[in-house]
């Protein structure tokens, strides 16, 4: 079984300041890691993913996350946030199709960017 | 390419009624998964369909059911609605390629049970 813990339920941050959202997971099988973002009254949008290879993955809008196997973490960072980054962010672990192909989500972190 | 489409976006029902939600996946995607999102329980996996067969199921009562059609469109049904079924229901589709399916989500159907 897999589980995901997002250590902060809310993160207030000023515009242009850096932000880090923490995510830790546990799993008995190999996992694939994802960050999704949810804007108000919308569904989930895939922000970035780690499947294999380089442990540092980046999104097109300036977010990055680093897979750390020894610490079982996949923290999300952005060096300078914008008002438009106000949203809820979900970390998720997925398994291979052979192992069941479902996502297990953390509880989410609400990011509120203040001017 | 159009994204995942869920209809309707909003629904209001009363206790005891049943409801059907619809999901059209991204063209070419054959796997459809359903999730329930509530403030208390967060995002929880309901079930997954592939080639018209339920391939995976979460821990929900039998009142929650689904099906998938030959064109990969999927429906989920909730019978005998309870107040606690009020939630955002999200559908995700994925392409069967590689070792892992990457899931893409629709905007959801918000169900309110009165």
Image (cartoon, helix red, strand yellow):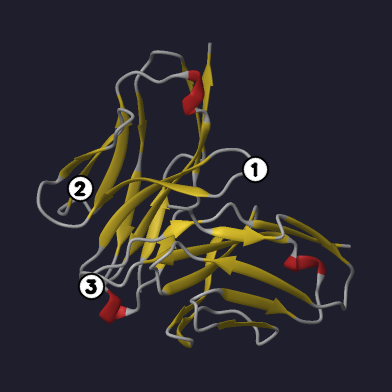
Q: Which comes sooner in the sequence, label 3 or label 2?
A: 3
Examine the rendered structure and indicate whether residue B98 appears above or below residue B59.
Answer: above
Q: Residue B97: x, y in percent?
A: 25, 70
Foreground of the two, B1 or B93 = B1
Residue B42 appears in the rendering: no
In the rendering, which numbered label is found on residue A41?
1
Examine the rendered structure and indicate whether residue A34 appears above or below residue A86.
Answer: below
Examine the rendered structure and indicate whether residue B46 appears above or below residue A44.
Answer: below
Q: Which comes sooner in the sequence, label 1 or label 3?
A: 3
The span from disc 3 to disc 2 (Cα, nearest Å) is: 15 Å
Q: Residue at x 43, y 64 (%)?
A: B27
* Chain at tag 1: A
- For mark 3, give the secondary structure: loop
- For mark 1, give the secondary structure: loop
| Callouts 3 and 2 in the same chain | yes
The span from disc 2 to disc 1 (Cα, nearest Å) is: 30 Å
The answer to which image quadrant residue B84 occupies is bottom right
Mark 3 burial class by Cα count in 10 Å: few <14, some 14-19, many 20+: few
Q: Residue B65: x, y in percent?
A: 63, 83
Residue found farthest to the left: A53
Judged by depth in the image, the label closer to the viewer, 1 or 3, is 1
For label 2, the residue is A67
For label 3, the residue is A29
Q: Residue B14: x, y in percent?
A: 89, 68
* Residues tagged 3 and 2 counted as in contact (Cβ below 8 A): no
Examine the rendered structure and indicate whether residue A115 appears above or below residue B73.
Answer: above
* Chain at tag 3: A
Foreground of the two, B88 or A77 = B88
Q: Residue at x 45, y 61 (%)?
A: B26
* Residues tagged 2 and 1 counted as in contact (Cβ below 8 A): no
| Callouts 1 and 3 in the same chain | yes
Q: In the rendered view, does A114 fall on the left or right side of B12? A: left
């Amino acid at each position: 079984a897999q589980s995901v813990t997002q250590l902060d339920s809310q993160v207030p941050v000023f515009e242009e300041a850096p932000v880090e959202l923490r995510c830790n997971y546990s799993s008995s099988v190999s996992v694939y890691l994802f960050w999704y973002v949810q804007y108000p009254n919308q569904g989930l949008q895939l922000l970035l993913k780690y499947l294999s290879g380089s442990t540092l993955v980046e999104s097109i809008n300036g977010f990055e996350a680093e897979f750390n196997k020894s610490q079982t973490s996949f923290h999300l960072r952005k060096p300078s946030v914008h008002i438009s980054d106000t949203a809820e962010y979900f970390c998720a672990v997925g398994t291979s199709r052979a192992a069941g192909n479902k996502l297990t989500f953390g509880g989410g972190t609400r990011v509120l960017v203040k001017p | 390419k159009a994204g995942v489409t869920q209809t309707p976006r909003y629904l209001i029902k009363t206790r005891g009624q049943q409801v059907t939600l619809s999901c059209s996946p991204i063209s070419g995607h054959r796997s459809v998964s359903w999730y329930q999102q509530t403030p208390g329980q967060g995002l929880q996996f309901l079930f997954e369909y592939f080639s018209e067969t339920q391939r995976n199921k979460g821990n929900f009562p039998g009142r929650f059911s689904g099906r998938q059609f030959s064109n990969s469109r999927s429906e989920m049904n909730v019978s005998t609605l309870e107040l606690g079924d009020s939630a955002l229901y999200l559908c995700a589709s994925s392409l069967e390629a590689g070792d892992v399916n990457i899931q893409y989500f629709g905007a959801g159907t918000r169900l309110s049970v009165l």
